[in-house]
Amino acid sequence: MGLIAWIKRLAGLSKDKKLICADCNTSFFFEEGEQKFFAERGLSEPKRCATCRKNTRRNRGPRRR
Ligand SMILES: [Zn+2]
């Protein structure tokens, strides 16, 4: 993330959304760029932070829940 994005975020000008992770309850930012990416693909907002998403992917076995 660039410095400008940080400044915008601090100033409240950013369109980044603050979400709470369903797994670890940490707040994380759903960045403007990601929002576009998800919207274009018709995906819903992420429920987990980047760390938990990575962990989920790694732990996902052949059986899907
Ligand atoms: Zn998390």
Image: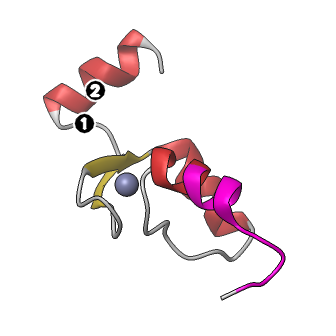
Could you tell me how far apart the alpha carbons at marks 2 and 1 are, in whole angstroms? 5 Å
Q: Secondary structure at mark 1?
A: loop
Instruction: Say which of 11 and 21 sits in front.
Output: 21
Residue at image x 70%, y 67%? 60
Q: Earlier in the sequence, mark 2 or mark 1?
A: 2
Q: Which residue is mark 2?
A: 8
Mark 2 touches mark 1? (CB < 8 Å): yes
At label 2, the amino acid type is Lys
Quarter of image, res 22: bottom left
- The type of residue carrying mark 1 is Leu
Quadrant of the image containing the C terminus: bottom right
Q: Nearer the viewer, residue 22 or 61?
A: 61
Q: Quick one: which residue is furthest to the right in this view? A: 62
Q: Secondary structure at mark 2?
A: helix
Q: Which residues are magenta?
A: 55-64
Residue under numbered circle 1 = 13
**Percent coordinates x, y for residue 40 in the rendering:** 72, 65
Question: What is the crowding at mark 1: few (fewer than 14 residues within 10 Å), some, or many (at least 20)?
Answer: few
Residue 49: x, y in percent?
A: 42, 52
Quarter residue 59 falls in: bottom right
Can residue 60 be found in the magenta stretch?
yes
